[in-house]
Amino acid sequence: GESVGLHLPTLSVQEGDNSIINCAYSNSASDYFIWYKQESGKGPQFIIDIRSNMDKRQGQRVTVLLNKTVKHLSLQIAATQPGDSAVYFCAETPHGKLSFGAGTTVTVRA
Amino acid sequence: DAGVIQSPRHEVTEMGQEVTLRCKPISGHDYLFWYRQTMMRGLELLIYFNNNVPIDDSGMPEDRFSAKMPNASFSTLKIQPSEPRDSAVYFCASRQKGDMGDTGELFFGEGSRLTVL
């Protein structure tokens, strides 16, 4: 069946460095993608989204890249801070019903 | 706005007991979603409503699970009878109708952590 998956389950980053979190998706009908951040004991929180008619979108310290040819999504975090330590999920939807990937745990080293 | 409000935050119960989880979505949101999160299976969509009507319940594990949305400001997820494998964090989320019809940011509650002994 269709699925959303992540390349790496964990990522350790030095404070101040840039982080790149990758995500693969398999549903070619998906036209909307979102990145969520989940801190311990809390619900997922929206970071940034992108529609399939775009290949790049920038937010505050974050950039999402979409490569529809290889069905790949990435989240780049600039100047990673301790507060960025969390689990990051990519999610896709072809018809409004979001499917989440397994998540990547990001740990920021001081 | 207070955001999506869920109760209880923590529930510990014994196998066979009925469990009711509650959710108050953000006012004005048309869609309400129930998700379950476990280490093994991640975030799974159980059911979602549009304008209080259940649209897709294909993720509901079995007949022991039921969800209702009697009005725009309240939804319940009930498990009867509960089993140890139901132990998980249950999230409620809501959103407005998106610009392109079916998309838009989901706002999640803080979750209800259920432990069934």
Image (cartoon, coloured by chain):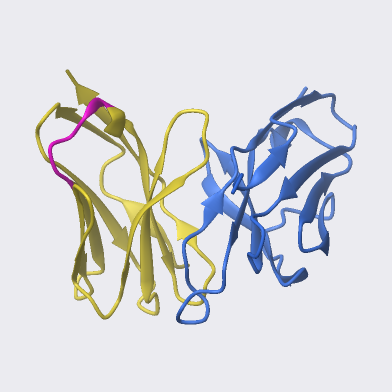
Chain colours: A yellow, B blue
Furthest-left residue in this view: A17
- Identified at 72% across, 57% down, the residue is B60
- Identified at 30% across, 77% down, the residue is A52
Image quadrant assignment for residue B9: top right
In the picture, the quarter occupied by the C terminus of chain B is top right
In the image, residue B34 sits, relative to residue A79, either above or below, namely below
| Residue A9 in picture, x, y percent from top left | 31, 38
Q: Nearer the viewer, residue B59 or B5?
A: B5
Position of B92 with respect to A52 (left or right) is right
Position of B107 with respect to B23 (left or right) is left
Q: Nearer the viewer, residue B77 or B95?
A: B95
Furthest-top residue in this view: A110
Q: How many marks?
A: 0
- Identified at 89% across, 32% down, the residue is B16
Please check the rendered image and state whether residue A73 is part of the magenta-colored stretch, yes or no: no
Image quadrant assignment for residue B50: bottom right
Q: Nearer the viewer, residue B85 or B33?
A: B33
| Residue B66 in picture, x, y percent from top left | 82, 55
| Residue A97 in picture, x, y percent from top left | 54, 68
- Identified at 83% across, 41% down, the residue is B20
Furthest-front residue in this view: B1
State the predominant SS element of the stretch in magenta.
loop
Span highlighted in magenta in the image: A77-82
Please check the rendered image and state whether residue A81 is part of the magenta-colored stretch, yes or no: yes
| Residue A62 in picture, x, y percent from top left | 21, 50
In the image, residue B6 sits, relative to residue A40, either above or below, namely below
In the image, residue A101 sits, relative to residue B98, either above or below, namely above
